[in-house]
Amino acid sequence: MRMATKSPADWLRLLCRDWSEENEQILSTMDERFLRYKSYLKGRLTSQLLCRLSSEMDECNDFWKILGVKDEFDRAHIVANVERFCSLYNIRGSNSNDVSLLTVNDMRDIKASQKIARKRIQAEINARIREGETIDY
């Protein structure tokens, strides 16, 4: 899996099966958006680039938002699944002698991503409440 290359929509079909089944309309335009966004990649992402783009979660460069995933919660869900995939298959790579160090660093990365996702979800909930929408828990 470390050297796998797929389109963004195919990655989501693989890593977020349930989400992709419910959001086929987003996936149907995703590859075209990606091709327009970075045409030199010819519509394909390696697993390493996928992991890097998904972990770069700042407001200016939100990869999944550019590809049409508008909902904050959905983007957080996708990022969490990509992070799990990256950790499981050691996509970012490391020295095999540093397994314990890798685990600690991976946990820090995951915790940081979760913290960002929680903040974004809370901001989305607050925005919806301000708009008068009711939120059932």
Image (spheres, helix red, strand yellow):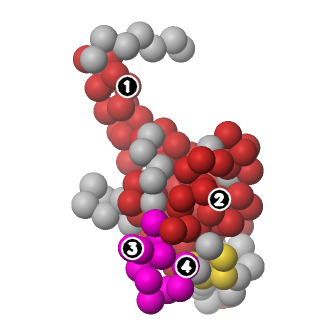
State the image coordinates of residue 53 (x, y, percent, origin top left).
45, 70
> Vertically, is 94 above or below 72?
below
Residue identified by numbered label 2: 12
Q: Secondary structure at mark 4?
A: loop
Label 1 crowding class (10 Å Cα cut-off): few <14, some 14-19, many 20+?
some
Q: Nearer the viewer, mark 2 or mark 4?
A: 4
Q: Is residue 101 left or right of residue 57?
A: right
Front residue of 28 and 133: 28
Distance of label 2 from label 1 (alpha carbons)? 24 Å
Residue identified by numbered label 1: 125
The amino acid type found where label 4 is placed reads Gly
Q: Nearer the viewer, mark 2 or mark 3?
A: 3
The amino acid type found where label 2 is placed reads Leu
Residue identified by numbered label 4: 43
The magenta region covers 33-43
In contact (CB < 8 Å): disc 2 and disc 4: no
Residue identified by numbered label 3: 37
State the predominant SS element of the stretch in magenta: helix
In contact (CB < 8 Å): disc 4 and disc 1: no
State the image coordinates of residue 8 (x, y, percent, origin top left).
58, 67
State the image coordinates of residue 12 (x, y, percent, origin top left).
65, 59
